[in-house]
Image (cartoon, helix red, strand yellow):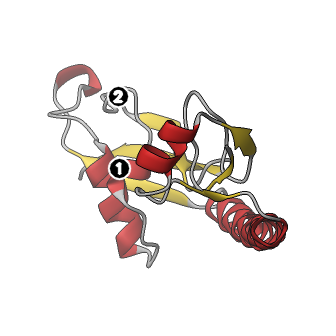
Amino acid sequence: MRLMLREDMENLGAAGDVVSVRDGYGRNFLLPRGLAVAATEKDVARMDHEKRTIAARTAKLAKELQSQADKLSQVSISIARAVGDEDKLFGSVTSRDISDALQEQGITVDSKKIILDEPLKMLGMAEVPIKLGKDATAKIKVWVVKKD
């Protein structure tokens, strides 16, 4: 049986691929769950059209995310923290703190998109990456300064 996959299947192929499967597998599993459709010329043409529209939409989204990343890369924020002897921080600066500081500047970034291996625990400047999308990453400058 020749079917066209509507979703990515780990052992069969990617969405839009035309695959040959046993009749029972196609009729009893793939077709009822909507994972595949019969591979007629009309369905193949429709799937090709859907692939093109999805590719165009993805390219447009990637371009927008990259422009956001370029703008965000020019941002620099300053976070004041209390320090003790030898300029050691009381506590640390987390991704939530960075997100809040960006929010004060009018920039909304989810703290889950801020990539910190571990919280910032020293005074000074650190470049912190923010993952906006699959291929769009921005690096902002975070200055940890002494609170007056």
Type of amino acid at the residue the image marks with label 1? Lys
Q: Is residue 106 left or right of residue 119?
A: right
Where does label 1 land, which residue? 112
Q: Residue at image x 36%, y 74%? A: 104
Above or below, comparing residue 13 to residue 106 in the picture: above
Residue 85: x %, y % from top left: 18, 23
Residue 88: x %, y % from top left: 24, 25
Quarter of the image where one finds residue 84: top left
Q: Nearer the viewer, residue 114 or 61?
A: 61
Q: Residue at image x 24%, y 45%? A: 81
Q: Looking at the image, can residue 112 be seen?
A: yes
Q: CA gap, disc 1 to disc 2? A: 22 Å
For the N terminus, which image quadrant? Answer: top right
Q: Residue at image x 77%, y 67%? A: 63
Mark before the other along the chain sequence, 1 or 2: 1
Circle 1 SS class: helix
Q: Residue at image x 81%, y 73%? A: 42
Circle 2 SS class: loop
Where does label 2 land, which residue? 122
Residue 30: x %, y % from top left: 49, 48
Q: Looking at the image, can residue 143 be seen?
A: no
Residue 10: x %, y % from top left: 55, 31
Q: Nearer the viewer, residue 123 or 47?
A: 47
Comparing marks 1 and 2, which lies closer to the viewer? 1
10 Å crowding of disc 2: few (<14), some (14-19), many (20+): some
Q: Is residue 136 left or right of residue 40?
A: left
